[in-house]
Image (spheres, helix red, strand yellow):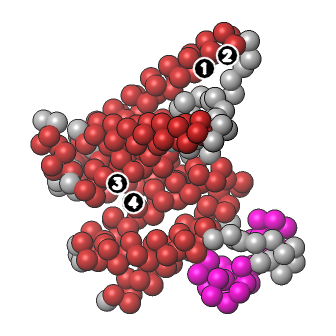
Amino acid sequence: MLVLVLLAGWGVGIAVNALADNLPYRRRPTRSDCPGCGARRSRLAWSGLMAAATGQRECAYCGGGAGWRAAVVEGMCVLGAAWLLQRNPQPASMVRDGLILAIYLLIVVIDVEHRLILFAVCVPAALGIGVMRSLDPQHGLAKTLLGGLAGFVSFYLLYLLGGLLSRWIGQARRQPIEEVAFGFGDVMLAGLIGITVGWPGVTVALFLGILAAGLFSLAYILAMLMRRRYTAFLPIPYGPFLVLGAAAVYLGGRTAFERLIG
């Protein structure tokens, strides 16, 4: 059983890498080719772990390196599969939780590398997770829909407020600010998180995500100031912090959070 679970986790990691390589450019799943020259990868190079183990991390045509992201993602998925097995060995629970975590891992990878949260990922994920969570007797349709609505609306208001603030600062500085605190991708992600953790867990998940992002930003600003390399309005990907908050609620005790806030 353990071997099958680890192999399944490895396969999920390969799929996440393939989607992260292609969706930001083509918005649809395609074959994972070399990002530098587009040449077809060897079969062993389809897997980051296998490519690292066999010395095929570099493209045979352009010599471009594949980086370590693919191997790291696959390793995380293998370890995550083992953890899910230990946490709850019921097949239905493992499949559901594994699928949800894989979707969020894909969102994090794309946001870190491209600063994009894609419509092509969030909308199908919202539909699929929404169905699964609505059919869950401990979650239900009402909590799912209310959580999704609360997450989307709250971050949409922050998105509008951030746009107005950036416009006001740009006018005051007489220099337009291209980056905003929240993009519309963050709004879609907040809605997806609400669907995943439901109501009222979405309030805690988003609060934890915002708090984590604020603490990271503060530490980063202090570090840059100490190195005298600080630049105002430097954008950071917000998605990973929101996903961190969602994971804390979804995996770390949804019932306890719900009791805490009512």
Q: Secondary structure at mark 1?
A: helix
**Residue occupied by mark 1:** 166
Q: Quadrant of residue 58?
A: bottom right
Q: Which mark is residue 100?
A: 4
**Between 209 and 29, the one nearer to me in the picture:** 209
Q: Real-space Cα distance between discs 2 and 1? A: 6 Å
Callout in the foreground (4, 1) = 1
Across and down, in percent, residue 36 comes to 81, 65
Q: Residue at x 17, y 43 (%)?
A: 258
The stretch drawn in magenta includes residue 90 = no
Q: Residue 247 placed where, x, y %?
A: 34, 54
Residue 74 position (above or below residue 119): below
Specify start and end residues of the magenta stretch as a single range: 33-57
Residue at the spot x=56%, y=16% of the render? 164
Residue 22 rendering spot, x and y as whole percentages: 68, 61
Counting residues from the N terminus, which is met first, the one under dot 1 or under dot 3?
Answer: 1
Quadrant of the image occupied by residue 230: top right
Labels 2 & 1 near each other (Cβ < 8 A): yes
User: What residue is pinned by disc 2?
Assistant: 170
Q: Which of the two residues, 65 or 6, is positioned nearer the viewer here? A: 65
Above/below status of 166 relative to 46: above
